[in-house]
Image (cartoon, rainbow, N blue to C red):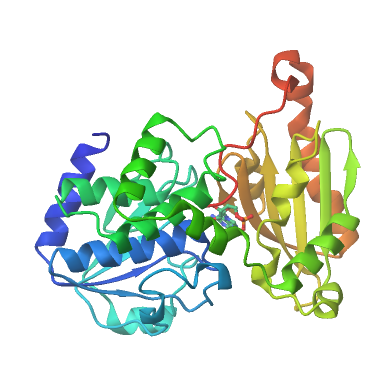
Amino acid sequence: MKNQASIAALLELIRERNSFVISSHLRPDGDAIGSALGLMHLLEAMGKQATVCFVDPIPANFQFLDGRDRIECTFPPVDAAIFLECDSLERSSIDRRQFEAAMPALTINIDHHRSGRDFAGFNWIDPEAAAVGCMIYDLALAAEVPISRSIAECLYAAILTDTGSFNYPSTSASTFAMAEHLVQSGASPNRIAADVYFSNPPSKVRLLGIALSNIQIDGAVSWSHVTVEEMDRVGATVEDCEGVANHLIGIAGVEAAAFLRELPEQNQFRLSLRSRRALDVSVIAENFGGGGHRNASGCSMEGTLADVTRRIVEQMREACKPLRNDGASVEAPTLPSILLA
Ligand code: 5GP
């Protein structure tokens, strides 16, 4: 098994302690929620106390996961805090003041982002893992904990969403072997897909309509935006913006894409960046204080819509130049490796 040393060291730290809080990044997605709940069930199977803590809301399409009703928004006093998919405390979905009041003696960071950082007391970062759900699966096997139906469903949902339904290049034979085991252990692919992909609120689909009608395409670069007024018009929430960027990079010939969401604060935008193949949008995101994966990153920017659009499009055009000079890299499109994280 890969990462054997990290897993052995992590298991020792877990075995020496009793109580854990698990959290992940702001605006948690399928991998954040599925992995956190899967790890909670795993720790409980090991005889530990585990609390999943998110201050952000859980999107409607992950409400079906077992343990979702036990998610807390207050940070309890514990022996150790485990952060999944996070590069810092600042990006975690916890209340910083509560964390500082509880101040667990140990912090643990489990991540698969290329821009992951060693911010915790113990850090296990594997950028090759298709999802943090895969890392929690390996941890469960090493702990010799039987995969219960609850663990199976949570980890399957995490892996399903972070591999773009087993479509991205991060998907390998071992991803399918994990999925097979999770299905044998009680995860229903049909039921999970129905909840995750076919339970969208009308506001999400209406917002997608607006975002798609705002699309601009210039050569290998595409971009779109939604304003606060457009979101209000269809009653959309922040969660409803999840996945819009994937439509932009799904356009034939497009190598880099940006989706801009206006924030209620004046002249503030959240950006979701997507790319194909070798084009690394995490570098662009990092230029603006953000980060993420090579093919899926994000950042915040300040300025008018026109100004932010101009700056991000300029950077994406620049990033596309070497690709377009290299015939091999603009051949038949492949799907981005990781669109959700
Ligand atoms: P999304 O566009 O779906 O919000 O994010 C794509 C990826 O980039 C996810 O893995 C997400 O965690 C990461 N990401 C988004 N925004 C930021 C940011 O501001 N900082 C960092 N470090 N990562 C980000």
Q: Residue furthest top?
A: 327
Q: Residue at x 30, y 60 (%)?
A: 149
Left or right of 71? Residue 329 is right
Residue 38, picture quadrant: bottom left
Q: Is residue 109 visible?
A: yes
Left or right of 147? Residue 265 is right
Q: Residue at x 87, y 57 (%)?
A: 307
Most foreground residue, 84 or 186: 186
Where residue 335 appears, as percent x and y from the top left, is 64, 35
The vertical placement of 91 against 110, above or below, is below
- Indicate the quadrant containing the N terminus: top left, top right, bottom left or bottom right: top left
Where residue 81 appears, as percent x and y from the top left, is 29, 68
Where residue 96 appears, as percent x and y from the top left, is 43, 78
The number of callouts visible is 0
Q: Residue at x 79, y 26 (%)?
A: 321
Where residue 294 appears, as percent x and y from the top left, is 58, 39
Q: Is residue 88 visible?
A: no
Image-quarter location of ligand 1: bottom right
The vertical placement of 143 against 71, above or below, is above
The vertical placement of 79 against 287, above or below, is below
Q: Residue at x 52, y 76 (%)?
A: 56
The vertical placement of 107 against 95, above or below, is above
Q: Residue furthest left?
A: 16
